[in-house]
Image (cartoon, rainbow, N blue to C red):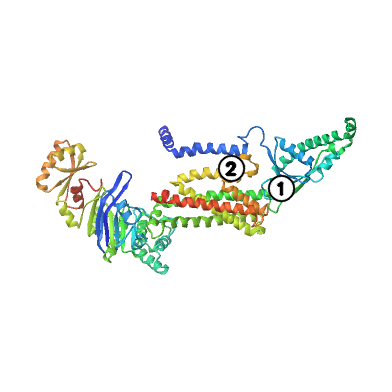
Amino acid sequence: MINVTDLRKSYGNHIALHGISFSIQQGEFYGLLGPNGAGKSTTIGIMSMLIAPDSGSISIHNHDILHHPVQCKQTIGVVPQEIALYNELSAVDNLLFWGGLYNVEKTTLKKRIDTTLQLFGLSDRANDKVKTYSGGMKRRINIAAALLHDPKVLFMDEPTVGIDPQSRNLIFEVVQKLHSEGMTIVYTTHYMEEAERFCDRIGIIDNGKIVAQGSLHELKSMGGNQEAVIITGNGISEAKAEKMRNAGFKVTTYENQLTFLSHNLKGDLSRIVLMCSEHGIDINDISIKHVNLETVFLSLTGKQLRD
Amino acid sequence: MFKIAAKDLKLFFADKRGMVLTFAVPIALITLFAFAFGGVGSSNEPDPLKLVIADLDKTETSKQLIAKLDSLEEFVVINATSDSAENLVIKGKKPAALFVLKGTGDSIRAGLMPAFELKYDQGQGPEVGILEGALIANLNKISGELLMNTMSTKMPPDSMMQFMPKQSNASNGVTIRETPLVKEKESPVGLIHAVAGTAIMMLLFSVTGMGSAMLEEKQEGTLKKLMMAPINPSSILFGKMISVNVISILQLIIMFIYGWMMFGLDILGHLPATFIMIVCTAFACSAFGVFLVSIAKSKAQVQGLSTLIILTMSAIGGSMIPSFTMPAFMQKLSIFSVNYWGIQGFYDVYWRELTLTDATFLTRVTVLIGIGLLLNFIAVLLFRRNVIALT
């Protein structure tokens, strides 16, 4: 249904995408997981025809987006990372405007607006100006605006950034409902919990490259099913981490944390603690993470998702 | 306290655009206003007055008189036929025209000081006054000289001396009959200037504000979302142009209705011409606002640029003071201002009462439409590069 082939994009000397390729099947929930600046938003931007690629191709429903942009735009809904609404207009007026751009017949549009507002729990605030909404409520309207023309594909670019738990849960419910109804969803996030929870398949993106993709199970296998030991303490530095790497450990630093990857946790744990002590690290806390997307990402890229 | 002050100063000097707005823009405006209002830039000698003369006498004497006037530093003579001289005044191109009446040569030859006619525009009182003052003194001198020359060729010096005191007309000087070609109307020229000048200047400020809503859309992400919709990117700009034009027309209509209700501006007597001028002025001003937004990269840049450009155009274009009271070189610059064409068009409607098909009125309308089309065209070209590219 969606085919992305050898997509490349540069901004001056900075290469944002190094020729990424992936395919998404109809009805699939595909996640693009990566840290900030990995190339997720650029990918979504190109797929939603906002950014022109340097080279490569994308087809949606067998239509090339460069040659048939209007048809392609009609079939997709885009939830941008920013809350793109008119604050001085009410929620209903915003939705009427955004839905109207997709030539939805007015009676149908009004019905869909009612349904969507109900779905997002905002019917009672429908006629209030958006500027009076909380951040979470605005995010919900931001998503609602992308659904009014009944798109076949929904692109969601980090839709839960910076919102309250109540709104997040509501968005999760709606996203799951849309997926269960057969909508194809492309979802970018740097929250691995969201990717693990919803995605049928996940593409891990870093430095403009897809470093791995597959189901959660497949990705865990690719990462070698390694577990992570996280040491929090004082005296941690990149120089010390480098010495530990030379000693054969797979280790990364982040603020006052060292993260070690291990296939044999029982055997390695005492060695890790001893080595930290030898390097003058004053350990405050040790935690162990079992195999998850974060440890997979770490093992594939040598970096943490939050880097 | 001092640390806070030092930090603020550091931030201020780090903001290059802010520095330009704080220092360079006021300096530029002071310079401009000094030229416009203070007569700075011209030498101490006043500029020669352009004097339109229609020679109805067409005698050797009248030609000599005109040649002598032309040889004076105070005047640059523009010879015209009777009709074209009147037209120049009626169309507002010159404040007055001097008519050398038939029989001028005969009068001088008869030892009488001649009579002239000054046909003028009542709306340009200050300029007419200056011209008339200079004319009286010089016409008296030149006519007296011609009269003396004529007498000296006709009679011996003794007889001439006896003759001269008898000419009571000569001692009284020349007669200048004043005929207003453009008379005081129901709408005084000051009122037309106040309403049109202010309305256009304020409209320019408000269209810039409306246009910069486009940059607001960019900053708030709605422009990106519009670009993702199945619409042509150019239609975003065209949609904005339509809304700015509609609001501009409404703004001008309300201002002129206010001028009518409060001060008696005669819009009811000139409804079609008023509407044409409002639409054309709104079109040109709206295009200016959209153009300004298309060349700027942020709302702050629009604000800085608009302050400078609008005040400049308003000063040279006659929104602040009538352009005919400015130095000659400033008057030449005024044609580069939207304000000038708009204000002159409204003068044509209410003061000169030109018809809709009059060439002068049509020229103003055409120039306004031309400005609008040109600026809109450039805006469309720049829009993709400066606005859409930055999304």
Marking on residue A146 = none
Give the answer, above or below, for where A134 lies relative to B296. Answer: below
Label 2, on which residue?
A: B333
Give the position of the N terminus of chain B as an image quadrant. top left
Foreground residue among A160 and A231? A160
Marking on residue B85 = 1
Q: Residue at x 71, y 44 (%)?
A: B79
Q: Residues within 10 Å of mark 1 (few under 14, many from 20)?
A: many
The CA span between labels 1 and 2 is 24 Å
The verdict on a common chain for dots 1 and 2 is yes
Q: Residue at x 15, y 40 (%)?
A: A245
* Residue A154: quadrant of the picture: bottom left
| Secondary structure of residue under mark 2 | helix
Foreground residue among B141 and B213? B141
Does residue A235 show up? no
Residue at mark 2: chain: B
On the image, the x and y values in percent for residue A304 come to 22, 47
Q: Say if mark 1 contacts mark 2, CB within 8 Å.
A: no
* Residue B277: quadrant of the picture: bottom right
Give the answer, above or below, for where A252 lies relative to B361. Answer: above
Give the answer, above or below, for where B232 lies relative to B50. Answer: below
Q: Residues within 10 Å of mark 2 (few under 14, many from 20)?
A: some
On the image, the x and y values in percent for residue B69 come to 74, 38
* Residue B155: quadrant of the picture: top right
On the image, the x and y values in percent for residue B356 come to 64, 57
Q: Residue at x 43, y 59 (%)?
A: A90
Foreground residue among A238 and B125? B125
